[in-house]
Image (cartoon, rainbow, N blue to C red):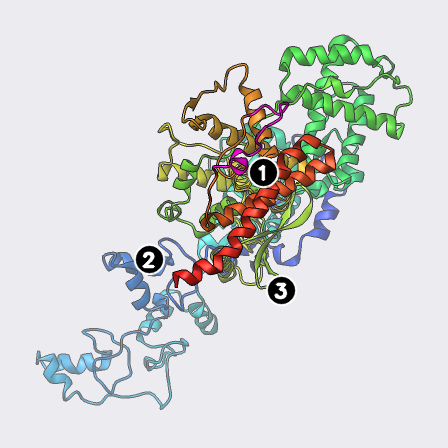
Amino acid sequence: MSLRSSAHAAGSAPGQSRARPAGLLHKLMAAVRAEFRADVLVADTTNPMFGPGPCSVAGCYRAIAGHGLCSGHRQRWVKAGRPDLAAFIAETDPQWRRHQPNAACLVGFCGYGAARKGLCQLHAQRWERSRGSDLATWLTAAPLVKQPPPGSTCRITHCQLWPQAASPFCHSHHNTWRANGRPNIDEFVANFAAVPVLALQRIELGSLAPQLKLEVQYALQCRHDDRRGKIAPPVVNRVVSFLARSGVASLTEYEEPAWRQGGHPELKDSMDRAFLTFAIRKVADLAEDDGWAAEYPRDVWKMRRLGYPGDTVIRFTGIAQPWLREHAKRWVRWRLTSGLGLEAGARRPVWAITRFSGFLTAAGIAGVTTIDRPLLERYMADLHTEFGTGNQHSVHIGQLSLFLAAIRQHRWQPELPADAMFYAADIPKKRDRLPRALTEQVMAQLEQPTNLDRWNDAGYRLVTVILMRCGLRVTDALRLPTDCIVTDSDGAAYLRYYNHKMKREALVPIDEELRTWIERQRRDVEARWPHSAPFLFPRPTKNIDGSLPLASSTYRLALYRWLRGCDIRDEHGKPVHFTPHQWRHTLGTALINKDVPQEVVRRILDHESPQMTAHYARLHDTTVRRHWEQARKVNIHGDEITIDPAGPLGDASWAKQRLGRATQALPNGFCGLPVQKNCPHANACLTCPMFITTAEFLPQHRLQHQQVLQIITAAEARGQTRLIQMNRQVAANLEKIITTLENDQPQEVADAS
């Protein structure tokens, strides 16, 4: 931002809504930097915040007016019949029309500017006296004319033509100087050489009252320092015109909630309204201070003043009881400063306490001494009436229970009755839902390279692959740092990310293909934001220096568009709709179903406890049972065995099958004998005199022998005598079989050779 002029300020208009905060003018004087204190601010075309950007023609630094061209080059392009834009940009002269060389006389040795017929005035007179001779023929023998002293040129810097007679300028520039009233020669030369400043580069603030001007300047300075999105000078000028007509002397005369709800019909453009809202907020924040000392006493907390991003507002105005509101504010402050986020630390607690306040008001209860266990039981009944046994019921009880416990723990209200508490049994049992894993049919469609290639943005495509293969939460994936790859001593690659839920860094192994894609994305980001973008997936717009990550809402919208374009359908032929978090469920389920140890899955998904991973293990048991129920089961006679999974013995039959697998190691089936009965021929084949085997089955025998020994060891540790007896004979027979086959194997090989 550069300054063009510093004109005097217009007179102030009286405020109409409310008095201005004391000390605001002093704060503005201290806050607004000199570069913004001018009646006219000129935006440099290279300024990423206010400048519209330089013309696409190399060497031209004038502001863009349309099609990536300045007004002059755009006019040339239009007059040329709108040829191919890229070719025009590459071939056109970058100089401003007034800075291009003027036409010289057609006579080769003449340095005067052309006046008529392509000839200077002197040669034009000579040719006219030749009485109509052919010009081309005449030029071959053109006479000499009077020349200026050697080295004389037009005073205009870029013009190398000879000056006209006694004038310091060539013919064309002399005419221009004369048409402008023969101004001072030095000023004319300087102004002629300068590039005109277009209206779309100028911010005019001279019509504003003194303090209002400072406030707008402060808002422009904040917009410049925030480095978020551009603000075009025409937008600012329209807002300035509106403020000048309104007669207000300060932006503090506007209440932000009222302004946002009602707006103003004179500002029809959304960008105009957005900038005015931004300016109102910034000036209000400066006037009212920030930090906990200033914000805590208020009943409406603007969280941006406490260092939180965005424009979140926490309202305590719905809590009618003063003592309850004070304790709620104290509790929320404690939760936020202990490290909890806005949702868990503020929004959810205030929501629960506000509803409880409404219940107390309806019940006619004003004092804390009447909040006892009977009252809480009435409140639980009220919650049940509204929410049933759903999740909101549990959240209300849980939040209020924590609130009452904090009051008692910190002794904020000694008069609170001792029985004013909830118990674990008061919270409705949470519905135990299975993980929402996507089916193999859906995943096969999502992972098809042709569908992945439908992404028109390489960053979005990579986010999708990371969510599929690594199981990250979408917020963690979008906040990956640019240096997110680490390697171990063996050169294996890991994805390093911050688990925001557990508040710790975590690692997940990745393959070389994914590593290559991540490195490519990092190079693309560095090419656009050299040495400034901290995230692997920066926000594509309103992110001047690349410091903001891609928002999850932006990615979700892009994901849903991609799904529609790919026409992903489920096994019933219906379009698929899911959330990115379901990829995390899908990965956990797939790993468990592939018999990956549960502890390994826990580390990959970075779960806090094994119980979280056990959620997927339970799904694995359900999956195995479903396949078992659908499979065709036969006995040794080939007769089909039918079990009704929905029948009264369905669960019992499944449990017996699981125990059968655990008590006898069979390579080709399982035992259907009830566990309470003794088996007269444990593992019948291996105790049957008719059993015959060969060396080709050695791998199966060795594996079965190992499994039998494991069963015996476990049974001995538990003192299960029957299981020990059932399996020792099997183990002994397997040892004999393996020993005999291993001893015979070399001789068989020798005979075969």
> Main SS type for the magenta part?
loop
Q: Residue tagged by mark 3?
A: 489
Could you say which disc has been placed on residue 74 in the image? 2
User: Magenta span has 490?
Assistant: no
Q: Secondary structure at mark 2?
A: helix
User: Magenta span has 686?
Assistant: yes
Could you say which disc has been placed on residue 32 in the image? none
For the residues labelled 1 and 2, the Cα–Cα distance comes to: 34 Å
Residue 381 falls in which quadrant of the image? top right
- Of pointers 2 and 3, the one earlier in the residue sequence: 2
The residue segment tinted magenta is 673-690
For the residues labelled 3 and 1, the Cα–Cα distance comes to: 54 Å
- Of pointers 1 and 2, the one earlier in the residue sequence: 2
Tell me the kind of residue under disc 2: Arg
Tell me the kind of residue under disc 3: Ser
Quadrant placement of the C terminus: bottom left
Relative to 267, residue 33 above or below: below
